[in-house]
Amino acid sequence: MSGARRISGMRLERVLPYVQVMPLAAVLLLFLVVPLVFVGLLSFWEFDDIQYYPSFTLANYQELFASPLTWKLMADTITFTAVVWLLTVLIGFTCSYFLTFHIRTLRVQILLLLICTIPFWTSNVIRMISWIPFLGKQGVFNQGLIAVGVIDQPLEFLLYSDFAVIVCYVNLFTLFMIVPIFNSMVKIDLSIIEAARDAGANSWNILTNIIIPLSRSGIVLGTIFVVTLVMGDFFVVKIMSGSQSANVVSAMKNEIDQLYYPPAAASAMLLILIVVLMITLVLRIVDVRRELVQ
Amino acid sequence: MPKAKSGKVELLNVIKQFDGIKAVDNLNLTIEDGSYCCLVGPSGCGKTTILRMIAGHEFPTTGRIMIGGEDVTGLAPVERGTAMMFQNYALFPHLKILDNVAFHLKMRGVAKAARQKRAGEMLERVQLGHLASRLPAELSGGQQQRVALARSLITNPRVLLLDEPLSALDEFLRLQMRGELKQLRKSLDITFVHVTHTQPEALALADRIVVMDHGLIEQVGRPEDIFNFPKSPYVAKFMGGQNVLYGSVDAVDPGDQNRITVVQESGNKLSAGVGENRFKRGDPIKLSVRRDKVHILTDGQAESAECGFTNQITGQVAGIEYQGSYVKITLDCNGKEQFVINAPDAVFFKRPVDLGDHVAAGWPPDETIVLHGDKDSSSADMAAG
């Protein structure tokens, strides 16, 4: 009797962890893996500009790789990503540095960090649209510059341009850089910085030899957020460029609007592959898991 | 190796305030070149602040700091020729041990191969050559401490500053590292300034002890002087090994002004020599006697003056702790003051006492020390344990 119970108890012990991960596994399976498999399958279906049929053809991929547009879109997307990444890293690192090393009390640190999140109290769309009256031809910025006398003609490049797209991305995504970098920076023991100064390091040495290396995991996490967000966006690039610029996803959106599902699926697969490769590369350079455990 | 510069440290009228609170109050202190100086005191007494001001990690509100005769008050740490070893070692967690040690050389622009060679030699010297490519987190506490030491020594300092260097180690390692610090001191002709709240550490290492309390120096001296002749009840209690007795002067020997009789609140009378100081009847006075100079007396001894233990105190045994080479016996005297006797184990076990026994303890009057300072502190009681 007791023996039997022990056996069933041991069995339960072995099964329990699987039961515990089941809900999350089910969600991921249903809403991530299954749709991805469908998209993957769809990308091999046959398509004749009007209808699509279940089959297995590489035609969608052949067309995708053969089209110069694909590579141009991909290059534009990566350029956007690179510029936005650079700006968000610079701003995010600077803000975190200020919060960590120039604000003495935890209370003020948290207060200022909360202030950074204020724009997030409203939706992405509102935040994006708000730039239009500011950057527009008759917008606040142009009017201001004209009033001060810096310019006499409104600057045209401010809105409906790549500039506007980048401004908007930076505004939307910098917080995703600040928070992880701040998180890794506050963990730096101040006596380490003193020890560096004791060993003859100046402020620049301390920044490059101590603070940047020890903020690495935060920078990597922020990079993952920003890269995936920018590469997956189609809305900002469409609105803020006034449909003059495009990226991979906005082109995909056009295809979907025209019910060109198999070609859209093929370019989705390509995009996923490239993003995964980029993230893998980043994680190869920095072992985030080890850094987080430390 | 001839030393380039003197490691004499002087603090002149140094005051340090934090938000209006004086952490260090008008301090004057000279630490001779090549000496080993321990700053001791309970936490918050200002000893670490002094160390950090010598290191240049903190600047005095007023006053000057001199090293080797030069005014270094406003200089950065690296310009002072000091090296500090931090309490938690403060190793760079992302750098290999070798690069931790080589950090100073890197900052000075020494080429990679050269600095790694010198750091490797320094690591060999602290017997850690085989761990050069490990990260700090992969090392034990004792090993980390040696790395921190190597990292400090590679700067070739004239003053080595140690902030509670042994406090994070377990008892065994602490004793081992204590020995190694002593050897290091012998092999290096530099000044050591060591902050600790552990009295045995200070006694074992220092050739000069500075006892501090609330930002002030209470007593400076050689370890044996501090231990045997504490200036005040505070020092006696903090350094340990002493019993402090309170009373008032009952009579001054008419034939010998040096000799007085002291009466305690209980009416118990003790005899003491006062040295230079002169007392008159009724003056309050504090005495101390070393725990190991006191003997538990037999009835016969207590009655006769022949054995010489004419200063006596009676009490009830409240604690007996076997300490190996001696036994610590705590007496409750009038339920107020506690009196501690450290009896050699052989003596104790020849004629043991039990908890609750009423016993008489005595010591020769010459072993009685008159405490001149007034400072008394209950925080010191706790620190001394």
Image (spheres, rainbow, N blue to C red):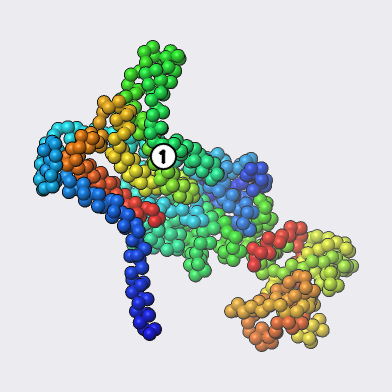
In this image, B246 relative to B344: left or right? right
Residue B107 can be seen, yes or no = no
**Residue in the foreground of this view, choosing between A56 and A201:** A56
The kind of secondary structure element at disc 1 is helix
Q: Nearer the viewer, residue A111 or B275?
A: A111
In this rendering, the count of numbered labels is: 1
- The chain containing the residue under callout 1 comes to A
Placement of the C terminus of chain A among the 4 image quadrants:
bottom left
**Residue found at x 56% / y 62%:** B205
Going by the numbered disc 1, the residue's amino acid type is: Leu
Residue A217 percent across, percent down from the top left: 37, 48
Regarding residue A105, the answer to whether it shows in the image is yes
Q: Which residue is mark 1?
A: A175
Q: Residues within 10 Å of mark 1 (few under 14, many from 20)?
A: many
At x 66% / y 87%, what residue is drawn? B350
> Would you place residue B338 above or below residue B235 in this image?
below
Q: Position of residue A48 (x, y in %)?
A: 11, 38
